[in-house]
Image (spheres, rainbow, N blue to C red):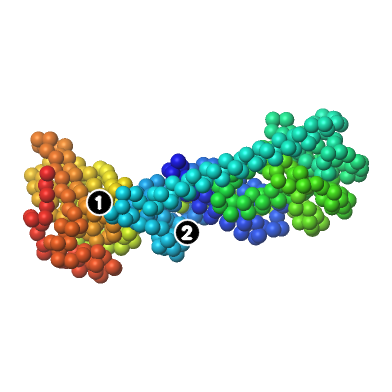
Amino acid sequence: MTNLFLSILSMSITASYVAFAVMIARCLLRRAPKLFSYILWSAVIIRLVIPTSFASSFSILRLLQPEAQAGTSFMEFMPQGMGMQKSPVVEAGISRISTFVYSSLPGAASMASVNPLQILIEIGSIIWITGAALLFLYSVSSYLKIRAKVRTATLVKDNIYETDQIATPFVCGFLKPTIYLPTGMGEHELSYILLHEQTHIRRRDYLIKPFAFMLLIVHWFNPLMWLSYAHMSKDMEMSCDESVINKMGQQIKGSYSTSLLSLSMGRSGLLTGSPLAFGERNVKARIQHILAYRQPSSRMMAVYMLVIAALVVGCTANPKPPLPISQPTYFGYHLDKLIKNKTLYVGNHVKVGGLIGGMPKPAGLEVTGLELQTKAQPYGVTINYVRSDSTEAAKEGAISGEAFYRNSLLLLSLIDNVDSITHSMVDNTDLSDGAAYSYTFTREQVNQRFGEDVRNHAADEASLRQLIDRLNGLSIKEASNPG
C-alpha cells in the first residue's frame, strides 16, 4: 500500500508540472479553437495513467532540472524506500521546493524502532485510499440517482429521450450513450442542442469524462488535478459549441446563446454533483466564447495542430540526460562531476552512481554493479567489480586496495549520510584461482584515521583538490580489510 501511495505521489507531482504547463499554453492560445486546449489535457491524463515515458531533449520537464531522474523511464520524485532512510530523499525538481521538503520531513531516530516518516507514509496511504473510496461511492451514488430520475423518460427517436424530470439536456450512459431532453424545447433550439450532444457522443466524451474523473478520484489529494478537471470539462463543452457553430453557421450565435441561458435558468441541481453525465455548465463563459468565436483559416488550423502536437510530445516526454562532456581530471578525478553529484542521501542512486563514475577505476577492474543499503542503519554502498586484466601487476594493485581506500574516503566525504563503503571484487581471469576480495571502510574508521570528519573537505573543487593531495600521501595498510 505504501509503495503504491508513493508511486501515485510521484505521478501526481509529474502531472502537476504538466498541468501547469497546459494552463499556461491555454492562456497563450486563447484565440485558438478550444478543441486544441481540450486535446492538450490528454498529456495530463497520460502522465496520470502511464508511470513511465520516453526520454527526449524536447521535454518541458527539462526546465525543472530533476537531476535525480533525468533520462529514466519513471519520474520518481518520491523514492520507494524513503520511509526507511535516515534523511529522506525527495526530488521536487525545483531546488527551493526540495530544500523546503527536506527540512519539513522528520529524519530517522537512531534509537527508535520505527522511523517516524514511515508511520506518516502509512497514515497518508490509509487517508488516501479512504478518500478515494468515499469519492468513488459518491460518484456511483450520484450516477444511480440520475438513472433513477430518467427511468420514465419517453423515447423520441433513436437514442433521444424526453422527460419532465430534468431541466437541462445531457448525455448519460457508457455502453449505449443516451441523450435526455427536457420537455417543451422549441424546434428552433432543439436542432443545435441535439448537435451539441451528438458531438459529445461522436468524440467519445461520454467515456473520456468519466475516465478522467476516475483518475481524479485516485489523485483527489492534489488540488491542481481538480482545477485541471474543471478546465478540461469547460474546454470539452466549448469545443462542442464551436463544432455546432462551424456546422450550422455564424448566424445561430444569438439564438444558441439565448437557449443556453434559458436552460441554465431553469436547471435543477441534479447534475451538479455528478461528474458522470453531461449538462449545460459554465454557461456564462460559454456564451461569451460563442459570441467571440471565429473559425480560423486553414493555414492557422495547420499551425495550431503543429503547436499542439509539439506541446503534447514535450509534456509526455521525460528529460533526456545531457551528453557527457570530456572534462580535465585531477589525478583521475572529475572534480566538477563529483561536486555536481554531491548528495545528502545515499538513497539517491543516480547521484551515487555519478560520484562513482567521476572517480578513477582501480587498475584492471571493471564495475559490474552497485548496491545501496537504505532500509536500516548503518547505510552503505557496495560496489561490485570483476578483474579483466590478467597481469600480476593489476592483481597486486587490486589486492593492495590503495585505490579502494581513496575512492571510499571521497565517497564518505561526498555522501552525507552513508556509514560504510564496500568494494567487492571477483577475479574471473584465466590466471585466477577463483579468489574474491572485499574491502569495507566505515565512516568511523576513516574519520579516526584521517583525524577529522572527511565531510569537511568536500565543500568545493578547491577543498577536494586539497583532500586528494592529502590522500596521495597516506597509506591504508592499517585501514583496509581484505576478506
Q: Residue at x 85, y 40 (%)?
A: 182
Q: Which residue is drawn at 80% across and 55% down?
A: 287
Q: Residue at x 25, y 70 (%)?
A: 462
Q: For the view shown, which residue lies furthest in the bottom direction?
A: 462
Helix, strand or loop for disc 2:
helix
Task: Specify the amino acid type for callout 2.
Answer: Leu
Q: Is residue 445 left or right of residue 61?
A: left
Which badge, 2 or 1, comes first in the chain's sequence?
2
Q: Residues within 10 Å of mark 2 (few under 14, many from 20)?
A: few
Foreground mark, 2 or 1, reads 1
The quadrant of the rendering that contains the C terminus is top left
Residue 339 drawn at (x, y percent)? 31, 63
Residue 81 drawn at (x, y percent)? 37, 47
Q: In which quarter of the image is residue 175?
A: top right
The label on residue 144 is none
Residue 178 drawn at (x, y percent)? 77, 34
Q: Is residue 444 left or right of residue 241?
A: left
Q: How far apart are marks 2 and 1 (CA)?
A: 32 Å
User: Do callouts 2 and 1 mark residues in contact (Cβ within 8 Å)?
Assistant: no
Q: How crowded is mark 1: few (under 14 residues within 10 Å), some or many (20 or more)?
A: some
Q: Is residue 129 left or right of residue 257?
A: left
Helix, strand or loop for disc 1:
loop
The label on residue 378 is 1
Task: Specify the amino acid type for callout 1.
Answer: Pro
The label on residue 64 is 2
Q: In which quarter of the image is residue 161?
A: top right
